[in-house]
């Protein structure tokens, strides 16, 4: 199934060249979790990253559905 | 005494009398400095019911004990006064260079009272203080005013001043320092304008001695290294400034869009930090000695929006940009420059124009009244409105009163997205419930700077909280409000806590801050004592609000009754009633939000 991964700001460097506006579409097997999907990218998977599914705070073991968007950004204050 | 000078400069603008006063060391310790000292004096010296633009209002500039020390980000000052926008309390914070220069005059705090009959500026060169005519700079914009006053005093001096907006009593007028930094919110520039005080020029070489200079130097180096680790791991603030944030808030569906009619903006890519870096960034501009360096010098090199200055930062992008539906980055950057030059808060300016745009589109305000069409996304109309607001020309006079009064005048108060009549910053609280409680209860009206729980709900600092739930948010808001009160009182920047400095593991908060305070002042605070002092300050501010009649902790119609139509928070409103009673209980306030006698006694406040 096809899902989207969006990496924000400094994490964008880890996206493949085909990514557009910080988003890449990837093909993953059924049963792939949020953690599995984001593990494909070279970003920290500890509490220095924020990872959300369709903009929502979820368990990292949540299985993905066709068309889902997993987004990651560095945990640092802004605003 | 160490750390604090324990000296206040008092300038009566009516009589031009200048006096110096000593500060009681017990008051100094109990109220920390900066924002804390300022509310102690404001509360005792003025009637909170007085008109904010009358001579009875008192305008206070206050540094903290860590201002002008080696402490990383120790370069902030507070402007504290009664707000003409909210009718309650203003405490606006700024960095740049002026705060350190102010502290080096030998005074911790300046108090301006009364009202001059003609434009003046105050030049403070250590203990030599002059009230000088400002007739020749009255009417001039911020950059030119700054250059002229430095030329006629000293190039070594630093200038805080108002622009035309402050002179004209525009209610979103800021006090600008070092040209591009702003004590922006709540109309503090209008208070300065009402006193005919055009500028404050400060210089000197009188740093107070530190209690333990060697220890302070070591701890500051350690803390700078910690911040350096934060910056390296989460380099967004260094690379993009706060302009990286629209992508985050857009992802979470809390990016204020078209006056909060939506929570996502379809053109975020056109106006975010990456676009800014690629198109207009010249270089990073840190505040004095700041290891974070989130400021940005930019230039629009040509075309109709040609200009040079600082910004836009996130809060400007979310107000003059997405708030107004504007996706032209050059125009948005120009709008930011204009606000700096006229001396205006970009948040209230942008969100007031956004409210007017919605009212225009709904037919509540006609093109004839405005003088031109004003639909969402019309960046040229937005720029035209900014100038009209600064000079209160035509419809600009309505806009200059802020969105609350604008919406009320034209019969549609439900359009204004304000708390205590102050416009919301860049986080839609329907998708960030803790921010909703913060805006509703904030002592200065809607503001993220009052206790930015978006650190946890949005940015995961130090831990990620679910922004859509209300559980635990009362405790979170209280903790952040007290923490930010301490940072504001100490003279530091809230970005010191950008990541690890706020972490439980490193125990920097409040342990390291109390240690810094002790190495600087010798006051011997425990971590519990600095937090109690912060709570004392917060409660005294609350008492000022109550005496000013600003007693209702609530949110506007849109936040409580109009569910977000889009994005991850679709269908949500702010569940304020689920959080407010618990918050009052945690604060030791009664069911109406008034501090109980027992709480005031515990804090050593008058009761």
Image (cartoon, coloured by chain):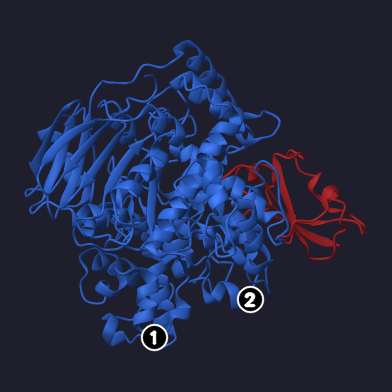
Q: Residue at x 32, y 25 (%)?
A: B5
Image coordinates of residue B249 in percent, x first then y, are: 60, 58
Q: Colour of chain A?
A: red
SS at circle 2: loop
Instruction: Say if mark 2 contacts mark 1, CB within 8 Å.
Output: no
Q: Do discs 2 and 1 share a chain?
A: yes
Residue B133 in the image: above or below residue B329: above
Q: Residue at x 25, y 41 (%)?
A: B111
Quote the CA–CA distance across marks 2 and 1.
Answer: 22 Å
Quarter of the N terminus of chain B within the rendering: top left
Label 2 CA crowd tier, 10 Å (few <14, some 14–19, many 20+) = some
SS at circle 1: loop
Q: Colour of chain B?
A: blue
Question: Is B553 left or right of B476, judged from the image as shown?
Answer: left
Q: Chain of mark 2?
A: B
Image coordinates of residue B13 in percent, x first then y, are: 14, 47
Q: Earlier in the sequence, mark 2 or mark 1?
A: 1
Residue A49 disc label: none
Residue B353 in the image: above or below residue B244: below
Q: Which residue is mark 2?
A: B563
In the picture, residue B121 is in which quadrant? top left
Front residue of this view, candidates A40 and B202: B202
User: From where the camera sits, is residue B162 visible?
Assistant: yes
Image coordinates of residue B364 in percent, x first then y, are: 39, 87
Question: Is B78 left or right of B510, judged from the image as shown?
Answer: left
User: From where the camera sits, is residue B163 visible?
Assistant: no
Q: Which residue is mark 1?
A: B411
């Amino acid at each position: 199934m096809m899902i989207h991964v969006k990496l924000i700001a400094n994490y964008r460097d880890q996206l493949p060249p085909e990514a557009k506006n910080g988003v890449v579409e990837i093909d993953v097997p059924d049963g792939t979790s949020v953690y599995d999907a984001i593990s494909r990218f070279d970003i920290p998977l500890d509490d220095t990253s924020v990872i959300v599914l369709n903009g929502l705070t979820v368990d990292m073991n949540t299985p993905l559905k066709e068309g889902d968007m997993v987004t990651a950004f560095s945990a640092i204050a802004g605003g | 005494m160490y750390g604090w000078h324990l000296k206040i400069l008092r300038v009566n603008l009516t009589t031009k009398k200048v006096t110096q006063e000593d500060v009681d060391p017990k008051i100094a310790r109990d109220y920390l400095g900066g924002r804390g000292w300022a509310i102690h004096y404001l509360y005792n010296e003025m009637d909170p019911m007085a008109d904010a633009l009358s001579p009875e209002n008192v305008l206070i500039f206050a540094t903290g004990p860590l201002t002008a020390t080696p402490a990383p980000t120790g370069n902030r000052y507070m402007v504290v006064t009664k707000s003409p926008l909210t009718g309650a309390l203003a405490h606006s914070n700024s960095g740049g260079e002026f705060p350190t220069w102010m502290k080096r005059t030998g005074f911790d705090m300046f108090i301006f009272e009364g009202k001059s009959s003609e434009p003046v500026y105050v030049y403070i060169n250590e203990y030599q203080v002059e009230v000088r005519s400002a007739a020749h700079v009255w009417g001039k914009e911020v950059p030119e005013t700054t250059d002229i006053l430095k030329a006629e005093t000293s190039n070594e001096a630093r200038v805080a001043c108002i622009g035309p907006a402050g002179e004209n009593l525009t209610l979103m007028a800021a006090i600008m320092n070092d040209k591009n930094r702003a004590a922006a919110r709540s109309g503090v520039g209008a208070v300065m304008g009402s006193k005919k005080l055009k500028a404050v020029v400060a210089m000197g070489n009188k740093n107070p001695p530190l209690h333990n200079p060697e220890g302070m130097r070591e701890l500051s180096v350690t803390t700078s290294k910690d911040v350096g680790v934060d910056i390296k791991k989460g380099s967004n603030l260094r690379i993009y400034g706060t302009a990286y944030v629209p992508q985050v808030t857009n992802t979470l569906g809390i990016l204020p869009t078209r006056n909060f009619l939506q929570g996502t903006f379809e053109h975020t890519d056109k106006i975010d930090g990456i676009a800014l870096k690629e198109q207009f960034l010249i270089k990073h501009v840190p505040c004095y000695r700041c290891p974070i360096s989130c400021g940005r010098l930019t230039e629009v090199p040509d075309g109709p929006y040609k200009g040079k200055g600082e910004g836009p930062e996130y809060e400007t992008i979310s107000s003059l940009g997405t708030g107004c539906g504007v996706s032209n980055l050059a125009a948005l950057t120009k709008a930011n420059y204009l606000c700096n030059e006229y001396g205006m808060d970009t948040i209230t300016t942008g969100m007031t124009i956004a409210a007017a745009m919605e009212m225009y589109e709904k037919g509540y305000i006609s093109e004839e009244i405005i003088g031109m069409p004003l639909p969402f996304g019309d960046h040229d109309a937005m720029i035209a409105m900014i100038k009209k607001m600064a000079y209160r020309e035509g419809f600009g006079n309505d806009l200059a009163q802020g969105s609350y009064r604008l919406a009320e005048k034209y019969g549609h108060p439900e359009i204004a997205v304000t708390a205590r009549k102050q416009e919301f910053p860049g986080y839609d609280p329907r998708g960030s419930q803790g921010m909703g409680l913060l805006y509703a209860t904030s002592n200065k009206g809607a503001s993220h700077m009052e206790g930015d729980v978006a650190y946890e709900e949005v940015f995961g600092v130090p831990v990620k909280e679910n922004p859509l739930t209300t559980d635990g948010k009362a405790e979170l808001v209280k903790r952040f409000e007290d923490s930010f009160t301490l940072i504001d009182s100490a003279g530091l920047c809230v970005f010191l806590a950008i990541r690890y400095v706020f972490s439980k593991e490193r125990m920097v908060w409040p342990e390291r801050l109390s240690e810094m305070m002790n190495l600087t002042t010798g006051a011997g605070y425990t971590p519990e004592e600095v937090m109690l002092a912060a709570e004392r300050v917060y409660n005294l501010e609350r008492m000022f609000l109550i005496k000013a009649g600003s007693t209702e902790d609530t949110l506007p119609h849109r936040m409580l009754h109009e569910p977000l139509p889009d994005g991850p928070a679709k269908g949500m409103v702010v569940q304020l009633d689920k959080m407010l009673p618990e918050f009052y209980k945690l604060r030791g306030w009664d069911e109406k939000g008034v501090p109980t006698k027992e709480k005031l006694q515990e804090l050593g406040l008058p009761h």
